[in-house]
C-alpha cells in the first residue's frame, strides 16, 4: 500500500528533500506540501492549509521554524492518528517534547538533513526512541537512503553529533570554496574561472577521498612533496584548522541549546 506524506512547512530544506525524492523516481502524487503563502513547491501538490489537503496522511513531516512548534502543534495534532508517523526536521525539539505534543502518533522520528539531499548526496541522520525503532528502521531508512547517507542512530546524542558534523557543512564548504576563488582572483584569474577551479578542486578531492576510502592523512601525504609548495601551505593551515572547526561547531552547538530552550518555553 502506498504511503502519503504531508509536509507542513516546506522551505529550502523540505524542497531539497522533495527534489531528491523526485530525482530518485518517487511518485509526486505521494507528497503534499502545506504552505500558508501558497507558494508552489516544485513537482508536488501545494496547499495553503492542512484542511485544504483533504487527506489523512501516513507521514507528517514538520518543516517549519522550531520557534513555531508550540503555536502550530495544536492544529497539526488534529490530523495525527495512531497510524501517523511524525517526522521532525526541527532543531532543538527532542523526541520527548514531540511526543508530549503529539501523543497519538504511531511513532516520532527525527531527521536532520543537509542541503545536498537535493542531488541525492546528503547526510541525514535518523532517530526514533522506543520498541518500534527496528520496525521503523526497515520502513523508513530505505526511503531516506534515496537522498544519501542516512544512518539510524542509537541515541539522540549520536543523532545530534552527526547532525553537527554534517548539517551545516555545505555552508562551511561554500565559504571555503569562495575563499579559494577570491584568492585566485587576487592572483589574476577571471572570477568565473577562479570559482570553477576552486569548486572542481573541492569536488574532485571529495570524490577521490570517497572513492579510495583511504585515511585523510594519507591523501594529504600523497599531495605533499617534502619541502614543496603544499607542505609550505599546510604549515600555515594545520595549526589553525582543527581549532577553527571546533570553535565553529561549538558556536552551532550553543545556538542549538538556545533553540531547544526556546522550544521548551
Image (spheres, rainbow, N blue to C red):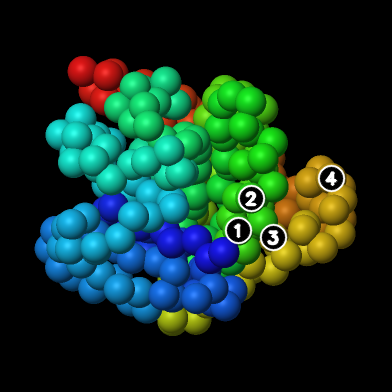
Residue that carries the numbered disc 4 in the rendered image = 215
Depth check, mark 3 against mark 1: the one in front is 1
Q: Nearer the viewer, residue 257 or 8?
A: 8
Whether tag 4 and tag 3 are in contact, CB under 8 A, the answer is: no
Q: Are marks 1 and 2 in contact (CB under 8 Å)?
A: yes
User: What is the CA distance from the residue labelled 4 to the residue labelled 1?
Assistant: 30 Å
Mark 4 or mark 1: whose residue is earlier in sequence: 1
Task: Name the residue: 63% across, 33% down.
Answer: 133
Q: Is residue 220 above or below residue 204?
A: above
Does 130 sit above or below residue 72?
above
Q: At which x and y percent is residue 242?
A: 61, 32
Left or right relative to 237: residue 229: right
Q: Mark 2 or 3 closer to N-term?
A: 2
Residue 130 picture quarter: top right
Distance CA(mark 2)–CA(mark 3): 30 Å
* Label 2 Cα crowd, 10 Å radius (few <14 / some 14-19 / many 20+): few
Residue beneath disc 2:
139
Q: For numbered disc 1, what is the local secondary structure?
A: helix
119 displayed left or right of 238: left
Please state which of the two labelled residues, at mark 4 or mark 1, is closer to the viewer: 1
| Mark 3 crowdedness (10 Å alpha carbons): few <14, some 14-19, many ≥20 | few
Kindly identify which residue carries mark 1.
143
Numbered tag placed on residue 230 in the rendering: none
**CA separation, marks 1 and 2?**
8 Å
Q: Which residue is mark 3?
A: 206
Would you place residue 234 above or below residue 52 in this image? above
Whole-percent x, y for residue 43 in the image: 37, 78
Q: Nearer the viewer, mark 2 or mark 3?
A: 2
Q: Residue 24: give x, y in percent of width and height.
A: 59, 74
Q: Secondary structure at mark 4?
A: loop
* Mark 4, other Cα within 10 Å: few <14 / some 14–19 / many ≥20: few
Q: Nearer the viewer, mark 1 or mark 2?
A: 2
Amino acid at each position: 500500500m502506498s504511503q502519503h506524506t504531508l509536509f507542513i512547512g516546506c522551505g529550502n530544506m523540505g524542497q531539497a528533500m522533495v527534489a531528491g525524492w523526485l530525482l530518485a523516481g518517487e511518485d509526486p502524487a505521494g507528497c503534499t506540501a502545506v504552505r500558508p503563502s501558497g507558494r508552489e513547491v516544485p513537482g508536488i501538490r501545494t496547499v495553503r492549509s492542512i484542511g485544504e489537503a483533504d487527506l489523512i496522511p501516513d507521514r507528517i513531516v514538520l518543516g517549519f521554524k522550531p520557534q513555531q512548534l508550540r503555536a502550530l502543534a495544536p492544529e497539526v495534532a488534529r490530523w495525527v492518528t495512531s497510524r501517523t508517523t511524525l517526522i521532525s526536521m526541527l532543531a532543538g525539539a527532542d523526541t520527548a517534547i514531540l511526543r508530549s505534543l503529539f501523543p497519538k502518533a504511531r511513532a516520532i522520528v527525527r531527521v536532520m538533513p543537509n542541503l545536498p539531499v537535493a542531488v541525492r548526496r546528503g547526510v541525514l541522520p535518523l532517530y526514533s526512541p522506543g520498541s518500534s525503532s527496528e520496525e521503523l528502521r526497515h520502513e523508513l531508512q530505505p526511503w531516506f537512503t534515496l537522498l544519501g547517507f542516512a544512518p539510524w542512530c542509537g541515541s539522540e546524542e549520536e543523532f545530534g553529533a552527526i547532525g553537527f558534523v554534517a548539517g551545516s557543512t555545505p555552508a562551511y564548504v561554500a565559504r571555503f570554496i569562495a575563499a579559494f576563488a577570491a584568492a585566485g582572483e587576487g592572483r589574476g584569474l577571471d572570477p568565473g574561472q577562479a570559482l570553477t577551479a576552486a569548486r572542481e578542486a573541492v569536488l574532485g578531492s571529495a570524490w577521490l577521498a570517497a572513492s579510495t576510502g583511504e585515511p585523510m592523512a594519507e591523501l594529504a601525504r600523497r599531495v605533499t612533496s617534502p619541502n614543496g609548495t603544499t607542505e609550505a601551505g599546510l604549515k600555515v593551515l594545520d595549526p589553525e584548522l582543527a581549532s577553527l572547526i571546533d570553535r565553529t561547531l561549538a558556536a552551532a552547538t550553543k545556538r542549538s541549546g538556545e533553540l531547544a530552550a526556546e522550544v521548551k518555553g
